[in-house]
Image (spheres, rainbow, N blue to C red):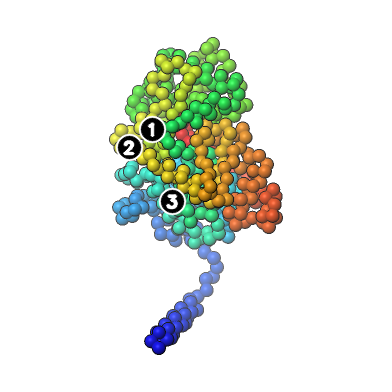
Amino acid sequence: MRKALRWLLALMVFIGTLSTAGAATAAQPEPSGPADIKDRILAIPGMSLIEEKPYPGYRYFVLNYTQPVDHRHPSKGTFQQRITVLHKDTSRPTVFYTGGYNVSTTPSRREPTQIVDGNQVSLEYRFFTPSRPDPADWSKLDIWQAASDQHRVYGALKPLYPANWLATGGSKGGMTATYYERFYPRDMDGVVAYVAPNDVVNKEDSAYDRFFTTVGTKECRDRLNAVQREALVRRAPLEKKYAQYAADNGYTFDTVGSLDRAYEAVVLDYVWGFWQYSGLSDCDTIPADAPNATDDAIWDSVDTISGFSFYTDQGLGTYTPYYYQAGTQLGAPTIHFPYIERQLIRYGYQPPRNYVPRSIPMRFQPDAMRDVDTWVRQHANHMLFVYGQNDPWGAERFRLGNGARDSYVFTAPGMNHGANVAGLVADQKALATARILEWAGVASPAVRANPSAAKPLARTDAKLDARGTEREPGLRP
């Protein structure tokens, strides 16, 4: 009896609550029309407008968003993180992009955004200026804090863009999208990670050495190796040229320690840099007879590919956050040079610690990448990894295990660090496109029945869809 009375009382209270809520709802005036998307974005707490830029068919906003320096302790300070929104329609899917470095403030559309004909939210990685706390507590620059930045941005914008979301990024951005999925697997409906390195064991890098013995053709490898060796043989005259170059441009070498260290770092990046950003057809631009080439020819070839400004204080400053992460969690490759006499190499591949000011403490965390790798193998769901056949960074890549579901690893033949879905062989290209459309919730019945019918939903825009390789100078993903 008591139970029946309690149930009846609860039912009456519930009905009364519904009636009150209905009356309150009915009493509110109907909106005159949908609010402007800019107003809706700026109504988000912590969101502020830097500028709006016009682009046909879209609205494009450059914004700041207030983020906690430490997501575990939000009360301990905030910073302004820069984001951009390429708005098409709130009913369309949204692609969440990061390159892992600074964000461009020029309207652009990544490949998945074109495929799904959607909106795009782009995020600047924390600690890349201007998205850097002041003062900077570098211990708060790690992959979990960065993933939590994305999680908060997604949580803020999802009510405005309720359709499906995909995360994407190239190189370090592909790594970032993967880490985001690992820590917040319920946020995204799919992940498209391009050319994402996966350095699980930092001290074991033999995969890179094997890569450089087979990439391209023997003729091309021999040309590159000979120029690299010759640059070390001619260290004295070319370093004299380097010193004048530095003086003319106001470059200094306090972080790396000396001009000599910087010079060798640039030279040792040469072969890697070529394959990362060039193609087999570019081998004709490499001096064919290095021992008999002029000093200027050797200098120009190395400068074009590696860049003699990269290991100066001025060149390294922008990338301090990357080298900090490489030396604390991400790992960094070390390769050998069997075609160069040992006495010509003084330092070898230098560790990331050498490229970060000594005032910033660093400690490597060997379990960080193993954790992500294990998670991907066992739990990947709706994840697509795309690599380039001739890209050195793909030598250590993400792989799928028995626990992965509806996930794929594809390699684009002949492509470098700019590999994409469009560069895959026909059947893989169609399958990848079909899965992206399905994850985004916009696959047609025809595509579901026959993946070979899958094509990007948006027409190519030569300006918006510029497919340039995401180039970062020096040995950086």
Res 16 quadrant in image: bottom left
Task: Give the residue type that dot 1 points to.
Answer: Pro
Query: Residue at 40% across / 48% down in the picture?
Result: 144
Can see residue 120? no
Residue 133 or 208: which is nearer the viewer?
A: 208
Q: Earlier in the sequence, mark 2 or mark 3?
A: 3
What element does badge 2 sit on?
Answer: loop
For the N terminus, which image quadrant? bottom left
Of 44 and 142, nearer the camera is 142
Q: Position of residue 137 (x, y in %)?
A: 31, 44
Residue 211, how many percent across, how many down?
A: 53, 29
The structure residue drawn at horizontal position 42% and vertical position 83%, both measured from the top left corner, is 7
Of badges 1 and 3, nearer the viewer stands: 3
Query: Label 1, on which residue?
Result: 352
Q: Residue furthest bottom?
A: 1
Q: Nearer the viewer, mark 2 or mark 3?
A: 3
Amino acid type at image mark 3: Phe
Residue 362 numbered mark, or none: 2
User: Label 2 to label 1, Cα distance in Å?
Assistant: 10 Å
Q: What is the CA distance from the residue labelled 1 to the residue labelled 3?
A: 25 Å
Residue at the spot 63% in from the left edge and 40% down from the top edge: 424
Answer yes or no: do the residues labelled 2 and 1 have beta carbons within 8 Å? yes
Q: Amino acid at mark 2?
A: Met
Residue 206, position as x, y percentages in the image: 47, 29
Which residue lies under the disc numbered 3? 183
Numbered disc total: 3
Between 263 and 229, the residue placed more toward the observer is 229
Secondary structure of the residue carrying tag 1 is helix
